[in-house]
Amino acid sequence: MDKTGFNDGWYYGKKDADGKTLVTLPHDAMILEQRHKSAPGGAAVGYFPGGAYVYEKSFAVPKEWESKHVFLAFEGVYRNAQVYVNGSRAGGCAYGYSPFTVVLDNLLQYGQDNVVRVEADNSQMPNSRWYTGSGIYRPVWLYIAKQAHIRHQGVRISTLSYAPARILVETDHTGQTNDEVHVEVIHGSQVVATGKGAKLELDVPDARLWSAETPNLYCCRVRLSREGNLLDEVEETFGIRRVEWNPGGLFVNGCETLLRGACVHHDNGILGARSYAESEERRVRILKQAGYNAIRSSHNPASKAMLNACDRYGMYMVDETWDLWYSHKSKYDYAAQFMENYRYDIRAMVERDFNHPSVIMYSICNEISEPKDKEGLAFAKEMIDYVHKLDNTRAVTGGVNLMILNMAAKGKGVYKEGGGRSEDKGDEKKATGSLLFNIIASKAGTSMNKAANSPKADAVASPFLDLLDIAGYNYASGRYPLEKEKHPDRVLYGSETFPQDIANNWEMVKRYPYLVGDFMWTGWDYLGEAGMGSWTYTGEGGFEKPYPWLLAEGGAIDILGNIGAEAIYAAVVWGLRKQPYIGVRPVNHPGVRVTKAVWRGTNAIESWAWNGCDGNKAVVEVYANAFEVVLQLNGRQLGKRRIKQFKAVFKTQYTTGNLTAVAYDRQGKETGSVQLSSAEPAGIVLRPEVTSTMPGDVIYVDVLLADSNGVVESNADTMLTVTVNGGELLAFGSANPRTEEHYDAGIFTTYYGRAQAVVRAGMGEAMTLTAGGGSLASVSTTIPIDILS
């Protein structure tokens, strides 16, 4: 079966509007829209409006395709996709996150140009609690096969045992019953196992197992032949690994595994929802570098590219289906279409995920209220049984908020008033469901973790939690110590937790075998839920902040991929970072009281470069796995603090120079030190993440205000302009959560001295990016492009 990208040469525009623009997929129409304060999606989608969009592509269909099987595979279209070929409807998909295929066999005109048209309707809003994007935001693929072929995703590889290694290879094809299926298992360039049969067990000698620590991958090559003639050939990447669980823990290949988890939304920051393979790989790589070994795809199935990256880097994936079931959370959300599509959504996810060793759990929900009653419980069991029927090798889980379920059982928090989102105006009686929880949590803080401890909450939630193979607890860490006595057969993990609670939570993960991990909200910042996690100096509080707020600003890693204080704090807690860390809360707001959000434990950044701030009050946080720490400024000791929960906090005044932290153990022996320095006069510095590239590749370039030593200046933000020759500027922006600037304009102001450009290489020999602005001298960087012969 031949697979080729079908992403070039598309023309896109608004439905029923004149004018079309040539684009390359993936594409996000929403990120190009003009934000405004009255956008019906509100803060949830970052004040972007929706719309109905049309994508069209003309492509040549040769005569020889007449005897072939031809179809298109769409990885994701938001939302209500309808596909037409030469004017005839070919298929579609209601859910914006499910992959789907469209068969073209009876619709093509052979020997001439054909037209495929995709309509994506995201005009009815609000329909989500976060930024969705609009249009064909994930790749599209063209498949061509003989009439007798191996079905799309028709090769399934299961690990039957890991010691010794034995796998099951099942092949679904459209050939005759006597056609031969030949299987080869390949590691590197060596064939390590072979066999024949559509359902075949194979021993793999000296197998290299897959885990987060050892992400070894194999290739399974399957050939379909008839009387010695090759009909089709498919290659699937897989890993040999087996996942097991019981109240004694979670085990991968027999080894106890603790999940150091990050909840991650699907958008790619300044790119919007566009899902480039390089962007998804970069996110997984940075998360792994930060110390995470697991991702919860919140709250929809992850992209194929992200799963591929998780396989390669060794990142466990909890792949999630939906944020809702048949009760609305937003007025125009997927609940109205859910019942007619949920089985397709489950099957599409499981069939796509089956051969990915990184996927260890399927999540069927997030903070839903339906299981409060018998109807909801029966429906939950039906779905769980269906997932098990499709794949009995992985656990079924869900992100369950016990407080929300308990409230729903009392008649509070269920879908009301048309599903519209209530505004947070200090009146919790107007809010419902997840929004009500968020408002209460933003006021009550992390003490909300105890709200699920009541016997009533336990009684309401337990029938559903006990249906799940592994129960996910959203903001219910107060229950962790109780569950051995109350529910001795339950296996659970923190599916959403506050990042500042990681020290307490991780201590419990290590202590209680049945508690298998912790997933902080959130691992990576995202668009929408505007201001949800921000520590702000504007005086704007509440869960949903007003326009022009854009980002949640609740990520342990910021929107550009900079590893922040909360992620480093977690790495210290996990025992992965040996050196101490210095974080400084912004010192350039003298006399202004910060308004804190509960979904963030600190707004400190790794900087002692605050030009013009001498004399301002400074709060310094030091993280270390040590007994005590000494803080020094320009060689003078500022103080000594005992480390409590891996952290010490100092209050001082900012003075230009060098800030040093030295950590000591109980015996007074130095265990590590770290230093931050102020910046000399700064200029623009460009740092591409690669030294060379290939035509069409996507590259990230950091655009910094830094001195000759590379020290970033945090208090000299400047509006910069970026241009590209020999390539395409896809986006340029910063991590500023509150702005009216546009990521597609090529003009943006740095934030704490940092911005970022994302570019796509052209077809020439080199690509040059130039940045300038204000009184700063313009600078350029050139990236060679390797031209393939």
Image (cartoon, rainbow, N blue to C red):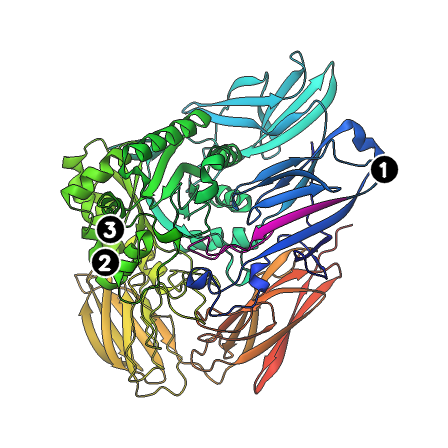
User: Which span is picked out in magenta?
Assistant: 115-137
Magenta: main secondary structure equals loop
Task: Determine the residue positioned at 75% across, 42% down.
Answer: 86
Task: Determine the residue positioned at 54% across, 17% down.
Answer: 199
Q: In this view, does 109 lie to the left or right of 429?
A: right
**What x and y, as percent, mark residue 503?**
24, 55
Where disc 3 sits, the SS reads helix
**What x and y, as percent, mark residue 576?**
34, 53
Of the numbered discs 2 and 3, the one sitting upstream in the chain is 2
Where disc 1 sits, the SS reads loop
The crowd level at tag 2 (other Cα within 10 Å; few <14, some 14-19, many 20+) is many
Mark 2 highlights which residue?
446
Q: Could you tell me the amino acid type at mark 1?
A: Gly
Report the mark closest to the observer, 2 or 3.
2
The crowd level at tag 3 (other Cα within 10 Å; few <14, some 14-19, many 20+) is many
> Residue 500: within the magenta?
no
Picture quadrant of residue 53: bottom right
Q: How far apart are marks 2 and 3 (CA)?
A: 12 Å
Picture quadrant of residue 376: top left
Mark 1 highlights which residue?
111
**What x and y, as percent, mark residue 519?**
34, 49
Q: Which residue lies furthest to the front in this view?
A: 417
Q: Distance between the residues labelled 1 and 2?
A: 65 Å
Q: Could you tell me the amino acid type at mark 2?
A: Thr
Task: Determine the residue positioned at 74% across, 16% down.
Answer: 228
Residue 505: assigned label: 3
